[in-house]
Amino acid sequence: MEVPFSRELEDKLSRIASQQGRDSMALVVEAVERLIDYDAWFVAEVDKGLAQAESGQTLSHEDVGIRLQKHIAAKRSAA
């Protein structure tokens, strides 16, 4: 499979690969693998959230606010 890149993108790819001491093709393959893995993870998380919503596992606006405030307070105390 061949994928055409603009000259600008090819130059960026070559520069990054060179900085990392890697082959450009290996960098492209890794980037595509990451994209595909992320997309699969994201779709699974959306499906999980939809299933929770359909089964009634939801939070009210107020409950979300309470959780967010607790999270922020924990981050501040850890800093």
Image (spheres, rainbow, N blue to C red):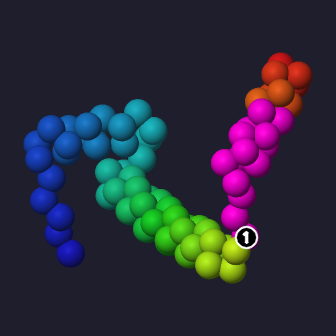
Query: Which of the two residues, 76 or 53, is positioned nearer the viewer here?
Result: 53
The residue closer to the viewer here, 28 or 37, is 37
User: Compared to 60, does 37 lie above or below?
Assistant: below
Identify the residue position indicated by label 1 in the image: 57
Residue situated in front as seen by the camera: 54 or 33:
54
Residue closer to the observer: 47 or 3: 47
Give the magenta-colored segment's residue range: 57-71
| SS at mark 1 in the image | loop
Residue depicted at x 70% and y 74%: 56
Q: Residues within 10 Å of mark 1 (few under 14, many from 20)?
A: few
**Does the magenta stretch mainly form a helix, a strand or a loop?**
helix
**Residue 29, placed above or below residue 48:** above
* Residue positioned 66% across, 48% down in the render: 61
Quarter of the image for residue 55 reads bottom right
Residue, x 73% and y 70% (percent of image)? 57
Seen in the image, is 61 located left or right of residue 20? right
Is any atom of residue 57 visible in this view?
Answer: yes
Residue 44 appears in the figure: no
Write down the quadrant of residue 4 in the picture: bottom left
Q: Position of residue 2 (x, y in %)?
A: 17, 69
Quadrant of the frame with the C terminus: top right
> In the picture, which quadrant includes the N terminus?
bottom left
Confirm whether the magenta stretch covers residue 78. no
**Left or right: 1 as drawn, with respect to 50:** left
Instruction: Kindly give the residue lying farthest to the right in the view shown.
Output: 77
Amino acid identity at mark 1:
Gln
